[in-house]
Structures are given as C-alpha cells and as structure tokens.
C-alpha cells in the first residue's frame, strides 16, 4: 500500500482543459497551493472550442491573460453559405454574431470578433500558470476518492503503473463529460442525447479554399458542412460534418470524410492534405443534479454538456471555475467558513440550466427543417441566417448573467418584489436597461482620475485576489462620519485581503490612509451604478467581478459579511 502524501494539502484539480486551468490559475494568484493533473500522456493539438464571449474577455483581463490572448487570436470571418448543387456560388454572407457598439460600462463589446483554437488557448493558460510554479502533471489519472472533515485522499494512477495516495484539501473535477470525478461523487447527468444525430470534426490542411470566410454547405434535415481557417500558417482548417437525422460515425475514417464532402458539396476542387485531429460525438444536452459533494466540486464539461450552438461551452466552463476559486481561497485561508462553498452550487446551477435551455433551443432550430422535405434544399442559405449559424441573442455575450437570488449577495434596496423563482428565470438574460443590483456583473467605468491626475478604468482597478469596496461619496454635506464608519467596518477584515476605493462625483475625495481615491471625471461610475444624489453608497465587488452588496452604511456591510460567512 503506497504511503499517503501529507505535504501542504493543495487543492487538486483533475483535468487540464480550460476550466481546470482557469481554476488553477485563479487559485494560484490567490496564493493557494494547487496540483493539476490530466490523464492524457501529452497535450492535445485539436482546435475544439474557439469562440470567446465578451464576459470571457473580462475574465482574461482580470487574470492578466487578455493581451496574450489578443496577440494570438485571429479575426472571426464572416459566414458564407453556398448554393447546392454546384457548391461554389455564394447564396448569403453574414456575421455569426451581431457586433454590438461599445459603451462606457461595456467597452469590451468594441473588441474585434476573434477566435483562437483551444489547444493554443490552453497553452497561454499553462504559460501563466507556470509563472506561479505550477505545471500540469500528465499521464496522471484519478481513480478513487475518500474524504473526511479535514480533507480528501485521492488515489492517482501515474503512467498506468504507479499509484499515489495524495492527501489534499479539496478536489475540483474538470475532467469533462466522460471524466471519473462526477461518477465518484454520485452526480448524475440529466437531460437528453440526440441519438439520431452525430458530429465529426477534423483539423485538416486544405488547398484551394479561401481563409477569408467561414464556409457553409447545408441540406436542412440532413447535414451541414462547415470549414473555417484556424489561423495557423499551414493552410489548416477546422472542418465539421454536422449530421441531422443521420449518424456520421463511419466518417471518422479520413477517406470517407473527404468523399462525403466531395459528394455532398460538389467541391471536388478542394485538395485535402494532412489530418491533424479527428473527433466524433453525439449532441448531448445534459447537466448534473449537483455540483458538489463535501470537498469535491465539478466544473465545466464535467458538469454540463451541450451542442456548440451559441458558442457557450468553453465560456460557461471558465465562469464555473472563476466563480468557485475565490470562494475556495477564502475558506482555505480561514477567512470564511465552509458554508460559503454552498453558494457555488446555488449560484451556478440556475445559470447552467438557463444556458442549456438557450443552446438547446438554438439546436432545435437547426434540425427543425427535417419535416419540410426536399423543397427545403433551396433554403440552405437561409439556414445560416435563421438557425444554427446565426446567433443573435444578447444573452450569449454573458454580460447579463447574474446571481440576484444568491444567498451570499445583499441589496439594501431589495429586488423589486421578485421571488427566487422569478429571479432565477432571468439568470442568463438579466435585466437590460434596468438599474444595476447586487448579484449583477459589476459595470466598467472609464475616466476615473486619482489624486495625481492619472486616469484609470474601474475594471483595471478590480482584482481577482480580493474584494473591492467602492464607496461613492457626495460632494456636499457631512459624509465624513458615514465614511469613517464604513472604512472601520471594512477594516475588520484581515489586512491585505481587500481594497477600498472612494469615488467623488465632481472632486477627488480627501486622502485617507489605506484608501485609494478617485474623482469620477465624466460621471460614468455614478451614472452606471445609479447612485443617489447626496447619499454615501457602498458597492462591494467580489473577486469574480460581480456585485456582492449594494448598501448605505456599516450596518449593511455587516449584513453582507454575515451572508458571506466571514470569520471576523
């Protein structure tokens, strides 16, 4: 029997895909020891998920990844559908996502639409993780778990031979839809599988095809073929055969794959070269019945699997991890009790359910043409505009995603009389055009001017390693006493675990020890956060960039701290 390792009881992350890597990086930035393992013997080189939603850009910004991502990414091309038969005459050209104009609170909407293959994205994540001294342990597979009140003993098989019993503090299962962590904690995938459909995706070199478009050939109710350049310099394309009412499993043979494309798109002029990857799967729309068992948590595809419609999978997965990691950090450090960890499941399950409903509806629109018969062939171009390949719902950007019903948020103004069921029903679509509340994404705000006259954006001030307390102060009236009591309440937290930012509407607030002061030069912050005139207001922003509390005094902060289960 191998000995139990008893070093510093790290958090063990099982699976080194995007969800696992973001969890590891966020924890490492918070000073939490982590181990991240993956059962594969080498890193994969498949494109897989490529799209990045605006909220993911913000997460990358908070974690210091954004510039590296933008340097590596390439423009997302326009979609172009072709008439059949023939396969060369364009029928329609359109944008997959509708470009939204930026605003002061959502400047990231002004970023160009870009894509990046998943294997390259994971490489960026690993490089940043290595800066914290953490490397992915390959050929290491979780096989068993035993947990008690103080930790978890994880049985790890290494290189198919060696066995290690690792004593860890917590386990995060990021090992995908086929992973073992879900099974070990007794979580069940609930939902449906499209047994009569199937997808085959390949990374393959192609000659004779322009990289300037995302090419589409489709016969509604039967198949869609898509080809998109990956942005690599070797003529590589990500090619998909999406079966509708037929299962293309035999097309995982490269020769049959190519022949199907030739016979159904009429593009025999294309020359297929080396196949770099090949993947087959059936569309599944499923989510787990629970995200946690004691000290073990599920994130990403280990918790939810769905069709690629809407480009939500990878983006939702990293939000799982970003939501969980800051909570684990507070509990690991002893700042909060373990009750805080229950909020991971209570916050994320309604969001996942809403996301699953939206993406499933988009997928159903794709296959809705199956009953129209042969006359639907002429509609192959409009397929892209109305179904699978035209994703216009504002919710898909994930900026309206919210947690207003969460047990750990507190808004002194209430929630407009809505009960939890009504709030959860808008978990993904949010409240566009309505005032911001606790549980919402914290809006950005430019043109904040500090005491030295330097400008900053609010999102550049927020940190993924500590909460930020924004104190909005009036220019007139006696606010000093209220401000003193608020600062004293925040200072009950352990030193170095928070930051206080005081904002003046027209003037820079007077200097205070341990406080950073800004003037809201253009009024964006006061307006976006809907701050009442002449009233001191505190907006507590969590490390994941969501508003935890909207209160007016030290008593409101104490209520918020009690909801967080802080040990003051």
Image: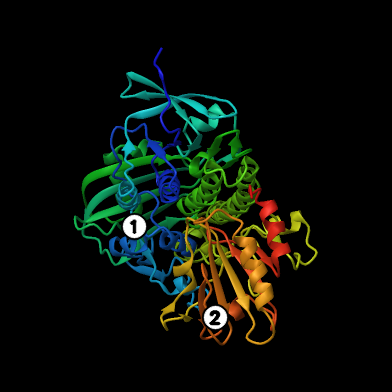
Q: How many marks?
A: 2
Nearer to the camera, 160 or 543: 543
Q: State whether residue 267 is above or below residue 129.
A: below
Q: Quadrant of residue 252?
A: top left
| SS label for mark 2 | loop
Q: Secondary structure at mark 1?
A: loop
Where in the figure is residue 111, as x and y percent of width and height?
A: 40, 72
Q: Please, is residue 176 above or below residue 395 in the view?
A: above
Q: Toward the viewer: 23 or 160?
A: 23
Q: Residues within 10 Å of mark 2 (few under 14, many from 20)?
A: few
Q: Nearer the viewer, residue 141 or 287?
A: 141
Question: Quarter holding the N terminus?
Answer: top left
Q: Which residue is mark 1?
A: 116
Looking at the image, is mark 2 or mark 1 earlier in the sequence? 1
Tell me the distance, in whole angstroms, between the alpha carbons under discs 2 and 1: 46 Å
Whether residue 29 is visible here, answered yes or no, is yes
For the residues labelled 2 and 1, say whether their Cβ atoms are less than 8 Å apart: no
Label 2 sits on residue: 510
Indicate which disc residue 202 carries: none
Estimate the x, y position of residue 256 in percent, counting from the top left.
30, 40
Q: Is residue 119 left or right of residue 20?
A: left
Mark 1 is surrounded, within 10 Å at the Cα level, by few (under 14), some (14 to 19) or many (20 or more) other residues, namely many
- Within the image, what quadrant is residue 87 found in? bottom left
């Amino acid at each position: 029997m191998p000995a139990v390792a008893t070093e510093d009881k790290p958090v063990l992350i099982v699976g080194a895909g995007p969800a696992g890597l973001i969890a590891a990086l966020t924890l490492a930035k918070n000073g939490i020891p982590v181990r991240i393992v993956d059962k594969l013997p080498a890193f994969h080189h498949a494109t897989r998920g490529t799209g990045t939603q605006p909220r993911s850009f913000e997460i990358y910004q908070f974690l210091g990844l954004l510039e590296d991502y933008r340097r590596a990414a390439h423009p997302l091309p326009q979609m172009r559908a072709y008439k059949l038969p023939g396969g060369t005459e364009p029928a329609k050209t359109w944008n997959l996502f509708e470009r939204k104009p930026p605003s002061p609170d959502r400047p990231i909407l002004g970023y160009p639409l870009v894509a990046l293959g998943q294997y390259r994205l994971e490489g960026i994540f690993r490089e940043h993780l290595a800066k914290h001294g953490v490397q992915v342990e390959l050929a290491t597979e979780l096989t068993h778990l035993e947990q008690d009140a103080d930790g978890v003993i994880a049985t790890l098989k290494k290189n198919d031979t060696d066995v290690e019993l690792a004593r860890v503090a917590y386990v995060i299962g990021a090992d995908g839809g086929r992973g073992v962590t879900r099974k070990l904690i007794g979580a069940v995938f609930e939902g449906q599988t499209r047994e009569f459909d199937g997808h085959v995706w390949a990374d393959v070199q192609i000659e004779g095809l322009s990289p300037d478009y995302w090419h589409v050939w489709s016969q509604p109710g039967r198949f869609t073929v898509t080809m998109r350049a990956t942005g690599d310099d070797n003529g590589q394309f990500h090619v998909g055969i999406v079966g509708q009412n037929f299962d293309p499993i035999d097309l995982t043979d490269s020769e049959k794959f190519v022949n199907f494309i030739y016979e159904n798109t009429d593009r025999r002029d294309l020359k297929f070269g080396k196949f770099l990857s090949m993947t087959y799967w059936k569309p599944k729309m499923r989510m787990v019945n629970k995200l946690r068992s004691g000290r073990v948590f599920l994130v990403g595809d280990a918790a939810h699997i769905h069709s690629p419609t809407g480009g939500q999978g990878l983006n939702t997965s990293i939000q799982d991890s970003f939501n969980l990691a800051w909570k684990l950090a507070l509990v690991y450090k002893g700042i909060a009790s373990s009750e805080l960890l229950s909020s991971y499941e209570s916050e994320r399950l309604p969001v996942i359910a809403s996301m699953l409903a939206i993406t499933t509806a988009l997928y159903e629109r794709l296959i809705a043409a199956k009953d129209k018969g042969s006359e639907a062939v002429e509609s192959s171009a409009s397929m892209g505009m109305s179904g699978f390949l035209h994703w216009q719902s504002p919710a898909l950007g994930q900026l309206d995603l919210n947690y207003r019903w969460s047990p750990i948020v507190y808004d002194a103004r209430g929630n407009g009389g809505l009960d939890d069921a009504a709030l959860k029903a808008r978990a993904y679509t949010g409240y566009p055009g309505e005032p911001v509340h606790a549980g919402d994404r914290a809006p950005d705000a430019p043109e904040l001017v500090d005491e030295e006259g330097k400008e900053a954006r609010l999102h550049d001030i927020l940190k993924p390693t500590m909460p930020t307390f924004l104190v909005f102060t009036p220019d007139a009236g006696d606010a000093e006493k209220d401000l003193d009591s608020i600062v004293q309440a925040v200072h009950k937290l352990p030193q170095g675990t928070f930051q206080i930012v005081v904002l003046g509407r027209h003037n820079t607030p007077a200097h205070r020890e341990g406080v950073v002061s800004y003037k809201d030069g253009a009024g964006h912050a006061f307006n976006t956060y809907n701050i009442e005139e002449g009233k001191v207001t505190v907006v507590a922003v969590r490390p994941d960039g969501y508003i935890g509390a909207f209160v007016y005094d030290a008593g409101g902060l104490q209520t918020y701290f009690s909801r967080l289960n802080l040990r003051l």
